[in-house]
Image (cartoon, coloured by chain):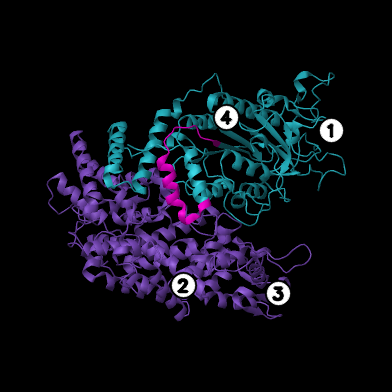
Chain colours: A purple, B cyan
């Protein structure tokens, strides 16, 4: 969203400026670099622009259905609206906004560079992966989660971040197995993020050489049969079952065994250039392999090229196209209706496994994301819930350990899903975790999470609202992105109104009353779905 | 009016539905559960993991095996009828071959009443004798520390999924989630049950209890049946509120054990007391996981006194108190006591023992044939030991776990819970029930 939209005069004592002031030296350098004016007030405004902490501002919503459409695409393509987003997307029109997201060429929010690129882990992952071994596991795990959360909360590339999470789970790696914590940052920066909208084949190839993946799925121990060793089928099995063709596509255990032999010797360096991919020709099974399911004969003596032949065949397989297309459809529209999935799968095959082309029908076709059938509310996973709440209230957050503890309590400690299938995307997996959601919602709105600051009262500022009813309606518009009179918000409106009336009768001061109402709004059934 | 589902009915429904295929899971489950109303006491599995490799040869001494005394001249427990040694040091008679460590005396009545069984020389295929790898192997339900990463209990929960998940279906009474529950999105780790409540931030000087109750009322209204139909989200909200109410009613801080049970001081006693409170509170608890540390007795393990004896005393007293406190619930609670490996057959020079292979498992509860020491005894002779001198593993730990799952938790799908395991003949714990 355009920073000018928030270029209002800031309160001299605003809490956000206090938070920002703690990083003042960095800020001054950054402000100077961007040629900002030196005036104190300008500086503060620039600080808010740089850190992406746009406090909630009461912006009247456009009328439905434009507002409802905008909210729908913001919720499904990204992690929900930030203050003002619904109006902005409605003004652009949902199609144009989706096209912009697909093009993936928006100027990034300075907040992302400001907050993410300064993390040691992210810098090392792109520059010197072996240096990651010098960082303790605690910092690695904290910063990995921090980077992912900050990007979801602050990036203008909402589709990119949704896909980064999608592919991270598709190619899931467990941080607590082997040296996962030291290896995953490189996987994130080099395997997943460069390819989220690009070529699936390239991402798959990168993943097959990712030290994190090879270590996680025991390919370090996948060797030609000989003294004291033999093939380990773990990677080959998940490559087919989870990464490409899917479990019911018709391959057999013999296919898995043959694929495993093609990947023998693909390992991770342990001493020199520690943590990098290596191919150990001595451990590679150089015999001929036949993979009946892929109708592929890998000739003897192929060495490292064996794996490439298998991956090329898998990436171009119709079962892979269908598996990937239906999984993407489920993420964005909650189901995988056949004519749509077939079109997306055809686009996948036609384009040589281009993810952007696969997404176009799902996001833009008449029976896709904007169709009536795609409007059934979907349960937010814990990550969706936490990120969307931080966005909704315009929180100024470092996404540090206190936020991560809430996310873990709700059930989704990032990079700590042990199985290779990734965090589940089914509602039934998360129904037991409502209480920690409620506690998170109340803590967030009550400003009780260290490192995270919200200014609820700003949502009502300047709107000249007199009655509690008007204020509740404004909170629902500001934080839930809905007209309070919309059918799905009506019950919430009544509940919050009743709560406010009782709280007022109990003598609760204004600011506490607003915090409680906002916390309840984030805890409500309405906010648990997208 | 919320329908209260007992866990056993839910499991029955889930198993049915799982058998019918995952596509049919939800509808089959709903049809089963919505029709079921009769209150019933549910089966609960309590898994107590002794961390560090508990010495099975000192827990259940093979006093009938002469090699035991040859290997353990200082640590060997005298036979129950050994008049030359002090009565306090002698093993407690279980059968002609085995005896409990004297500090496990509180468990003796349970054994003789058929409510406790011992499985000896049990373990996994792990050959590393590393705590981390052996625990990872066992908690993940594997043969070795490679392969599937999720826990065996998580896979059990997954293949008997309940909708909506009762929020307290699986609870680790611990700071962090044990590996056995990793991957169970519905499992909760709480160091204290008092954490399971709405905890709004303290604002100003408002009386906290008043605000908490006002906020709870508003959440109750928002998730009420009239708030938005009876969908999964609203019913899950009501399940959660029901569990919160139940815990508030139990008031774990002030829970009083019944039937004269006295838990010893310590984390284990506290944890088991909370588990008992949950079981009696009918919150839908199916699995509780607890840990007990301090079993890595390389030095000063001791015989009838020493580090090991102290741990055994706490273990025995805690389990006995738990059994007594459960009262009429006892028969529906299966308690499994396991460890990652046993210890070296021969004592070392520091009155301790080093990492070994075969160990002991205890099973306590109802519905099986207790009062017996199960497992093929491999012997302690020089040609009978394995590797550096360890008790061989003659019973794969998954034989017992899969029998418990099938008989007590109504989950016959050992193939899903233990993907690498080919079932062999059952140990026979549940043979009368078959």
Q: Secondary structure at mark 3?
A: helix
Q: Residue at 80% of width from left, 37% of height from top? A: B347
> Quarter-wise, where is residue A85 in the image?
bottom left
Q: Residue at 56% of width from left, 37% of height from top? A: B45
Using residue A305 as the reference point, say whether residue A156 is left or right of it. left
In the depicted structure, whether residue B321 falls above or below residue A128: above
Q: Report the Cα–Cα distance between label 4 and label 3.
A: 59 Å
- Magenta residues, as a range? B19-44
Q: Nearer the viewer, mark 3 or mark 1?
A: 1
State which tag comes first along the sequence, 2 or 3: 2
| Magenta portion: prevailing SS class | helix
In the depicted structure, whether residue A482 falls above or below residue B195: below
Q: Nearer the viewer, mark 2 or mark 1?
A: 1
Q: Are marks 1 and 4 on the same chain?
A: yes
Q: Nearer the viewer, residue A507 or B17?
A: B17
Marks 2 and 3 close (CB-CB < 8 Å): no
- Determine which residue is flagged by label 1: B65
């Amino acid at each position: 969203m355009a920073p000018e939209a928030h270029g209002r005069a800031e309160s001299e004592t605003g809490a956000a400026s206090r938070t920002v002031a703690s990083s003042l030296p960095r800020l001054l350098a950054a402000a100077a670099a961007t040629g900002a004016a030196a005036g104190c007030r300008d500086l503060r405004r620039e600080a808010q622009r740089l850190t992406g902490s746009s406090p909630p501002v009461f912006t009247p919503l456009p009328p439905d259905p434009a507002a409802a459409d905008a909210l729908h695409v913001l919720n499904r393509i990204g992690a929900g609206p930030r203050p003002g987003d619904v109006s902005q997307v409605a003004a652009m029109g949902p199609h144009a906004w989706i096209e912009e997201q697909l093009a993936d060429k928006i100027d990034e929010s300075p907040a992302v560079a400001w907050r993410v690129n300064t993390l040691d882990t992210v810098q090392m992952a792109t520059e010197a992966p072996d240096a990651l071994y010098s960082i303790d596991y605690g910092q690695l795990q904290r910063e990995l989660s921090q980077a992912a959360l900050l990007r979801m909360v602050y990036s203008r590339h909402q589709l990119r971040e949704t896909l980064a999470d999608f592919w991270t789970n598709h190619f899931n790696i467990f941080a607590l197995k082997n040296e996962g914590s030291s290896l995953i940052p490189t996987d994130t920066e080099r395997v997943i993020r460069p390819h989220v909208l690009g070529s699936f084949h390239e991402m798959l190839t990168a993943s097959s050489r990712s030290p994190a993946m090879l270590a996680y799925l025991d390919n370090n121990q996948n060797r030609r049969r000989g003294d004291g060793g033999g093939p380990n089928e773990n990677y080959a099995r998940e490559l087919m079952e989870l990464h490409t063709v899917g479990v019911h596509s018709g391959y057999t255990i013999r296919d898995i065994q043959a694929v495993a032999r093609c990947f023998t010797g693909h390992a991770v360096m342990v001493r020199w250039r520690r943590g990098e991919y290596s191919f150990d020709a001595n451990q590679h099974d150089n015999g001929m392999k036949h993979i009946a399911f892929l109708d592929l004969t890998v000739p003897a003596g192929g060495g490292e090229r064996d794996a490439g032949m298998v991956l090329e065949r898998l990436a171009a397989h119709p079962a892979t196209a269908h598996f990937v297309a239906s999984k993407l459809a489920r993420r964005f529209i909650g189901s995988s209706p056949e004519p749509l999935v077939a079109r997306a799968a055809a686009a996948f095959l036609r384009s040589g496994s281009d993810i952007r082309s696969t997404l176009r029908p799902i996001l833009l076709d008449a029976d896709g994301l904007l169709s009536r059938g795609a409007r059934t509310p979907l349960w937010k996973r814990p990550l969706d819930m936490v990120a969307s709440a931080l966005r909704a209230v315009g929180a100024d957050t470092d996404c540090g350990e206190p936020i991560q503890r809430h996310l873990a309590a709700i059930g989704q400690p990032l990079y700590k899903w042990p199985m290779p299938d990734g965090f589940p995307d089914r509602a039934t997996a998360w129904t037991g975790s409502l209480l920690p959601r409620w506690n998170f919602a109340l803590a967030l709105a009550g400003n009780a999470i260290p490192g995270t600051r919200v200014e609820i009262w700003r949502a009502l500022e300047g709107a000249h609202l007199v009655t509690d009813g008007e204020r509740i309606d404004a909170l629902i518009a500001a934080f839930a992105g809905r007209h309070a009179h919309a059918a799905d918000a009506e019950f919430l409106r009544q509940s919050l109104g009743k709560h406010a009336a009782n709280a007022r009768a109990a003598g609760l001061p204004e600011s506490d009353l607003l915090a409680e109402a906002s916390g309840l709004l984030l805890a409500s059934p309405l906010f648990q779905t997208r | 009016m919320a329908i209260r589902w007992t866990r056993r009915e839910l499991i029955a429904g889930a198993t049915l539905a799982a058998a019918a295929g995952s596509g049919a899971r939800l509808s089959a489950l709903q049809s089963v559960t919505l029709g079921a109303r009769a209150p019933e006491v549910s089966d609960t599995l309590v898994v107590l993991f002794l961390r560090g490799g508990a010495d099975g040869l000192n827990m259940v001494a093979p006093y009938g095996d002469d090699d035991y005394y040859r290997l353990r001249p200082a640590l060997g427990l005298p036979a129950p009828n050994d008049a030359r040694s002090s009565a306090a040091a002698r093993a407690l008679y279980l059968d002609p071959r085995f005896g409990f460590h004297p500090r496990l005396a509180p468990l003796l009545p349970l054994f003789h009443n058929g409510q406790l069984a011992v499985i000896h020389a049990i373990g996994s295929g792990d050959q590393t004798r590393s705590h981390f790898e052996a625990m990872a192997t066992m908690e993940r339900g594997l043969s070795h520390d490679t392969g599937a990463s999720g826990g065996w209990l998580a896979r059990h929960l997954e293949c008997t999924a309940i909708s909506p998940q009762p929020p307290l279906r699986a609870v680790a009474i611990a700071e962090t989630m044990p590996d056995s529950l990793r991957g169970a999105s519905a499992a909760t780790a709480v160091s204290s049950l008092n954490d399971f409540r709405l905890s709004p931030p303290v604002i100003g000087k408002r009386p906290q209890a008043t605000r908490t109750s006002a906020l709870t009322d508003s959440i109750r209204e928002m998730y009420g049946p009239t708030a938005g139909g009876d969908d999964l989200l609203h019913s899950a909200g009501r399940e959660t509120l029901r569990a919160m109410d139940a815990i508030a009613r139990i008031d774990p801080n002030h829970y009083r054990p019944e039937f004269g049970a006295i838990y010893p001081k310590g984390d284990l006693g506290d944890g088991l007391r909370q588990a008992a409170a949950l079981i009696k509170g009918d919150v839908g608890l199916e699995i509780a996981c607890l840990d007990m540390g301090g079993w890595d007795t390389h030095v000063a393990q001791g015989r009838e006194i020493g580090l090991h004896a102290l741990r055994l005393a706490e273990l025995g007293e805690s389990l006995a108190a738990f059994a007594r406190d459960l009262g009429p619930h006892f028969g529906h609670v299966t308690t499994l006591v396991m460890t990652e490996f046993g210890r070296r057959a021969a004592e070392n020079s520091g009155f301790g023992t080093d990492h070994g292979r075969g160990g002991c498992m205890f099973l306590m509860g109802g519905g099986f044939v207790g009062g017996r020491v199960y497992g093929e005894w491999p012997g302690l002779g020089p040609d009978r030991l394995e590797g550096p001198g360890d008790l061989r593993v003659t019973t794969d730990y998954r034989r017992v776990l899969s029998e418990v799952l099938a008989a007590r938790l109504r989950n016959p799908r050992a193939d899903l819970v233990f993907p690498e395991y080919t079932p062999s003949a059952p140990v026979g714990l549940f043979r009368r029930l078959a």
